[in-house]
Amino acid sequence: MYFKLRDKKSLMSYIWLLFTFVYSSYILNLYYLSTLSPDYSRYSKYLNYFNSEVEVINLEQGLAYFFLIYITKVFLYNFITFDQLEEVYTFNDHEFFISLAIQTGNTLLYIIGIVGLYFLIMHFFSFESSSVILVLAPGRSCLRVSPPRSRPGALPPSGRSC
């Protein structure tokens, strides 16, 4: 079994990975709408295809990624309601759910990739589990634990980037 918590170092590395992962996912969903990206108008045709709004797509990408996003959107739409929030905030449900589905689908793919890399490294090399986790976590956490910058391209207050 690869996931053994033998000491405080292993426990702390798992806690750090979990904290940075959850925190960065929440920050991303709060401050970024995927429906505002320049590619959304082109690739939304795939989601329309799975909604049966379009019969032919005529684009060159495969369908597996967009099917994952569609399934995630259906899951979120059926199990999450924001009726209480709508009384306080005004937002477009459709755009929010699409953006949340895209980010959640990307997060699922990221989790699969990180777990696969972890098992691959643990299988072929003899590193400590905590060391591998600390190496895998900063790829996502170092850049995304800090809150969004006040202006595009600005460096953090210390003057250096991650």
Image (cartoon, grey):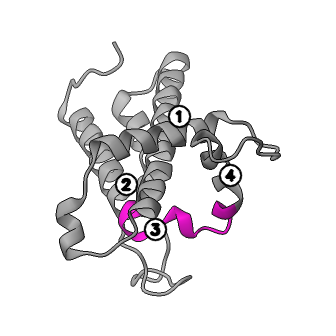
Where residue 24 appears, as percent x and y from the top left, is: 36, 57
Where residue 68 appears, as percent x and y from the top left, is: 54, 36
Task: State if disc 1 and disc 3 touch (CB < 8 Å).
Answer: no
Q: Which mark is residue 32?
A: 3
Q: Amino acid at mark 3?
A: Tyr
Secondary structure under badge 2?
Answer: helix
Q: CA distance from mark 2 to mark 1?
A: 16 Å
Label 4: how many Cα within 10 Å (few below 14, some 14–19, many 20+): some
Q: Amino acid at mark 4?
A: Lys
Q: Is residue 83 above or below residue 110?
A: below
For the stretch drawn in magenta, the main secondary structure is helix
Q: Which mark is residue 45?
A: 4
Taking the image as drawn, is residue 85 in sight? yes
Q: CA distance from mark 3 to mark 2?
A: 11 Å
Q: Amino acid at mark 2?
A: Ser
Residue at 47% across / 83% down in the picture?
159
Magenta-colored span: 28-41
Task: Name the residue tied to disc 2.
Answer: 25
Give the position of the N terminus as an image quadrant: top left
Where residue 16 appears, as percent x and y from the top left, is: 28, 47
Secondary structure under badge 4?
Answer: helix
Q: Which label sits in the foreground, 3 or 2?
A: 3
Q: Which label sits in the foreground, 2 or 4?
A: 4
Q: Is residue 4 left or right of residue 115?
A: left
Taking the image as drawn, is residue 135 in sight? no
Q: Nearest the camera: 80 or 144? A: 80
Secondary structure under badge 1?
Answer: helix
